[in-house]
Amino acid sequence: MLASGSAVTAADPLWGAAARRLKDASEVFIFGYSMPAADEKARDLLFGNLSREATINIYCRSTGEEIAREFRCHGFGRVNSFPEIGFEASPN
């Protein structure tokens, strides 16, 4: 359901498909995505559609623990952070 005044975009069917898939997911992997507060749509998609029983695996060196805390605060019990593995620093 769109909020009053929201415009429909070409990406809306993709967001809807992602929401349906997330509802069925038992395990999710987040690689190198810092989940910035400004990315409200993606955050709402994850927090609002994943089962609280799903296992969340986070691979983000710089913010992995912070993201894990956010998932726990949203009622997720199976949250794993792997700060030693991430994509922020690439080898030279």
Image: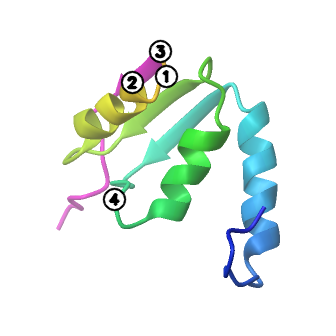
Q: Tell me which residue sits at (23%, 44%) in the image.
A: 61
Disc 2 and disc 3 in contact, CB within 8 angstroms = yes
Labelled pair 2, 4 in contact (Cβ < 8 Å): no
Q: Is residue 61 magenta?
A: no
The circle drawn on residue 37 is: 4
Q: Relative to residue 9, is residue 50 depicted above or below? A: above
Residue linked to disc 2: 72
Identify which residue is drawn at 76% across, 72% down.
12
Pointers 2 and 1 in contact (C-beta within 8 Å): yes
Say which quarter of the image contains residue 74: top left
Q: Which numbered tag is attached to residue 77?
A: 3
Question: Residue 76, relative to residue 44: is it above or below?
Answer: above
The disc labelled 2 sits on which kind of residue?
Arg
Query: How busy is the neighbourhood of tag 2: few (under 14 within 10 Å), some, or many (20 plus)?
Result: some
Q: Quadrant of the C terminus?
A: bottom left
Q: CA distance from mark 2 to mark 4?
A: 16 Å
Name the disc covering residue 76, or none.
1
Q: Secondary structure at mark 3?
A: loop
Marks 3,1: beta carbons within 8 A? yes
Looking at the rendering, the stretch of residues picked out in magenta corresponds to 77-92
For the question of whether residue 52 can be seen, the reply is yes
> Which residue occupies the foreground of this view, 84 or 55?
55
Residue at the outermost front position:
4
Identify the amino acid type marked 3: Gly
Query: What is the secondary structure assignment of the residue under circle 4?
Result: loop
What crowding class fits label 3: few (fewer than 14 Cα within 10 Å), some (14-19), or many (20 or more)? Answer: some
Q: Are marks 1 and 4 in contact (CB under 8 Å)?
A: no
In this rendered view, identify the residue nearer to me: 80 or 89.
Answer: 80
Tell me which amino acid carries mark 1. Phe
Residue density around tag 1, few if under 14, some if 14–19, many if 20 or more, within 10 Å: some
If you read the primary sequence from the N terminus, does the residue marked by circle 3 or circle 4 appear first?
4
